[in-house]
Image (cartoon, helix red, strand yellow):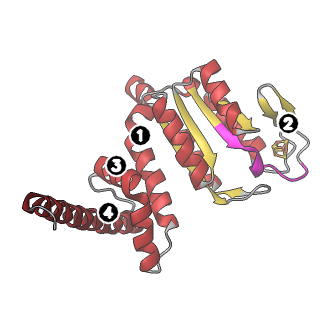
Amino acid sequence: MLPEYLNQLFYLIGQAVVFLAAAVLLISVLIALLILYSFKTGNFFAARYMLLGIMLLEDVIKSLFWVARADDSMVDDVGVRLRNYINTKKFLETPYEKRFIFMPQCLRSVQCPAKLTPEGIMCIDCGRCGIGEAKKYAESLGYRFYVVPGSSFIKRIIKKGRPGAIVGVGCSMEIKEGLDLCHSHGIPARGVPLSTSGCVATSIDWEAFYEAIAEVPSTEKQGA
Ligand code: SF4
């Protein structure tokens, strides 16, 4: 037989655990509904709290999507859009010349003739994929443009070049990791997800990419 005070203690702990589990479930359901709303409308409600909720409760929220037979990639998609939205003001305060673009090498044509250099894979605009055109346009605005051979490359270039803002292209997982990396360096970043992921010959919505990079810095708007 346990003493009465221990019985009471276990009872209280049990109640606290049930209460906590119910609270986590309730908050997760609420965030899942907000994700659906944002996915369908493109609008965000309580963006920072929503992002915090996604970061802390991602697994529970994805399980809810799975139970409801809904596509849980919506969680990643909205997570990236939320981060982009929250970073917008600081991103736009950065002039083009201080912004870097990191493009994944998997977007290249399988017949890409570009060579690997210390500055990444050096696109020669051979016309076999959209990177050459994107590079020309981005550099005409003032961006520094890199085709990334591997993830350690980005860390090295951030350390060396100290960008004011970053646009990163990649699969949802790479973008999430990249945005977290930028956040840890205090760099406002924008992620542009690939339309089809994989190891080679992936694809991107180029219109979304050009839209993400072309937005005029707020400093230039004020000076106009
Ligand atoms: S445009 Fe550039 S990246 Fe694309 S295949 Fe040609 S050299 Fe490679």
Question: Which residue is disc 1 drawn over?
Answer: 88
Question: Which residue is disc 2 drawn over?
Answer: 124
| Residue 119 x, y percent position in the rendering | 76, 26
The image's mark for residue 68 is: none
Q: CA distance from mark 1 to mark 2?
A: 31 Å
Residue 186 sits in quarter: top left
Q: Is mark 2 within 8 Å of ligand 1?
A: yes
Mark 1 or mark 2: whose residue is earlier in sequence: 1
Seen at 76% across and 50% down, the residue is 106
Kindly state the secondary structure of the residue where label 3 is placed: helix
Q: Quadrant of ligand 1?
A: top right
Question: Which residue is disc 4 drawn over?
Answer: 31
Q: CA distance from mark 4 to mark 1?
A: 22 Å
Q: CA distance from mark 1 to mark 3?
A: 17 Å
The image's mark for residue 52 is: 3
Q: CA distance from mark 2 to mark 3?
A: 42 Å
In the rendered structure, the answer to whether residue 55 lies left or right of residue 211 reads left
Q: Residues within 10 Å of mark 2 (few under 14, many from 20)?
A: few
User: Is the C-beta separation of discs 2 and 4 under 8 Å?
Assistant: no
Viewer-side label of 4, 1: 4
Mark 2 or mark 4: whose residue is earlier in sequence: 4
Amino acid type, residue under disc 4 in the picture: Ile
Q: CA distance from mark 2 to mark 4?
A: 45 Å
Query: What span is in magenta?
Result: 102-111
